[in-house]
Amino acid sequence: MTKTKSRGFFLKRLFSLNPFSITIGSTVIVLVLYFISVPILELIDLKLYDLRFLSRGHLQPSQAVVLAVIDEKSLDTEGRWPWPRSKMAGLVEKLSQAGAKVIGFDIGFLEPEKDSLASDPALARAIKESAATVVLGYFFHMSKEGLNYQISQEEIDRQLGQIAPSRYPQVIYEDQSAAPPLISAYAPEGNLEIFTRATRNSGFFNIIPDRDGVVRWMPLIIKCGNGLFPPMFFLCAWHYLDLPPLRVRIAVSMTREIPRSALSIPVLKSRRRL
């Protein structure tokens, strides 16, 4: 059999409808769809990921973490939300007296309370005098286009100055020119100055859902201005661990947040963690 005939026979066999050609064709199609990021394949992958978690089963959470939630029972007892900040001050005092080591707020105190001029100073005083470390929460505006109002550069710089004490203190780039881009934000929306004077600790509580609207990951780094900032829950854990040395190592393939030599947290290129 000549070389031309052999090639023709192979091509004829490849493109004829048989199990071999169907397998090869299906594999090629799936790979092409995967690399061009077809949404349906991404959604299937996410649902398969959920199934793996369901098959793993429930894991018992740490007893070191207690959620003081604002639920229906709380609203029935304490009244409708938002509560006056004098009540939040009482919550800080009671949690501190109960032995809490760290208190984290996943809400922001962004505007002055109008109903009572004494509430903001009362909460600030409770935060400052608390035996527990208090970590405030804030959020980032991720893009200028997502705002329906303008923020001056002076205001952005002022807000960055307020959250600057909580940025990652040490950042190491293994190869800054080749490192993948970080999640970047346009501007922070921080707490009132009366509260940032009461505690230097604050972290963002932005969430970034997947394409199907489910939150599976949390960003461990958001870049804004010249700083890299940690999430609120990460700072709570850091203070709970008694402030071990904290640094961020940014590699070409992944990023690691390393609170101490015995504990490292590997993350994906997108700087996210489950």
Image: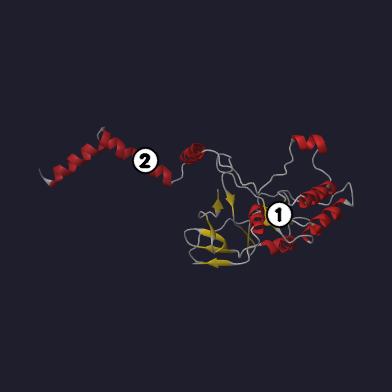
Residue under the point 79% across and 60% down: 198
Q: Nearer the viewer, residue 65 or 114?
A: 65
Residue under the point 15% across and 45% down: 4
* 172 on left or right of 164: left
Q: Which amino acid does label 2 sit on?
A: Ile
Answer whether residue 186 is visible to the viewer in this image. no
Q: Point out which mark residue 247 bears.
A: none
Q: Is residue 229 above or below residue 5?
A: below
Answer whether residue 243 is visible to the viewer in this image. yes
The earlier-in-sequence mark between 2 and 1 is 2
> Regarding mark 2 in the picture, which secondary structure is present there?
helix
> Regarding mark 1 in the picture, which secondary structure is present there?
strand
Residue that mark 1 sits on: 102
- Residue 23 quadrant: top left
Residue that mark 2 sits on: 29
Q: How crowded is mark 2: few (under 14 residues within 10 Å), some or many (20 or more)?
A: few
Q: Which of 208 and 73 is in front in this view?
A: 73
Q: Nearer the viewer, residue 262 or 84?
A: 262
Q: Which amino acid does label 1 sit on?
A: Val
Furthest residue toward top: 17
Task: Please state the horizontal and vertical placement of residue 44, each as a whole percent of the image.
Answer: 47, 38
Q: Give the distance between the C-alpha atoms of the residues marked 2 and 1, in whole angstroms.
A: 52 Å
Task: Please state the horizontal and vertical placement of residue 203, each as a whole percent of the image.
Answer: 68, 56
